[in-house]
Amino acid sequence: MRIFVNGDQREIEPATLASALSVLGYGGKKVATAVNGRFVPAPARAATALNDGDKLEVVAPMQGG
């Protein structure tokens, strides 16, 4: 399936947000996620289905002062 991750087109097989994050290298990391502009909390990722053409935003927290 074709999705867009932070604006870049990607071809992936996973059908849920949680599995897509794992395949994309974000598995186990603290990140904020949104699908098509809607925030998806971490507990809901396994139940969030992805569809062809979805836009996924992944944001990692920054440290510093």
Image (cartoon, rainbow, N blue to C red):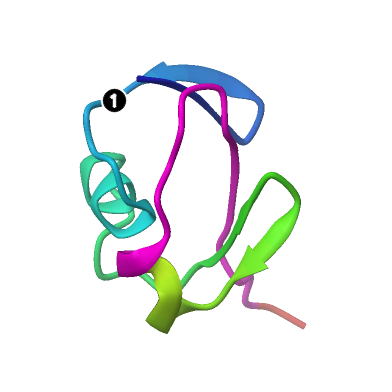
Q: In which quarter of the image is residue 30?
A: bottom left
In depth, the one of 22 and 36 nearer the eye is 36
In depth, the one of 30 and 38 nearer the eye is 38
Residue at the image position 31 percent from the left and 45 percent from the top: 20
Query: Image check: 52 left or right of 59?
Result: left
Residue at the image position 67 percent from the left and 67 percent from the top: 39
Residue 17 on the magenta span: no
How many labels were placed on the picture?
A: 1
Residue 50 on the magenta span: yes
Mark 1: secondary structure? loop
Q: Position of residue 13 (x, y in %)?
A: 22, 28
Circle 1 residues within 10 Å: few <14, some 14–19, many ≥20: some
In depth, the one of 18 and 8 nearer the eye is 18
Q: Which residue is the site of mark 1?
A: 12
Above or below, 49 against 43 in this view is above
Q: Where is residue 42 in the image (x, y as percent from the top left)?
A: 44, 78
| Secondary structure, magenta segment, majority class | loop
In depth, the one of 10 and 26 nearer the eye is 10
Query: Image check: 40 left or right of 2?
Result: right
Q: What residue type is labelled 1?
A: Ile
Q: What stretch is highlighted in magenta?
A: 46-63
Q: Position of residue 38 (x, y in %)?
A: 72, 59
Query: Image check: 24 left or right of 60?
Result: left
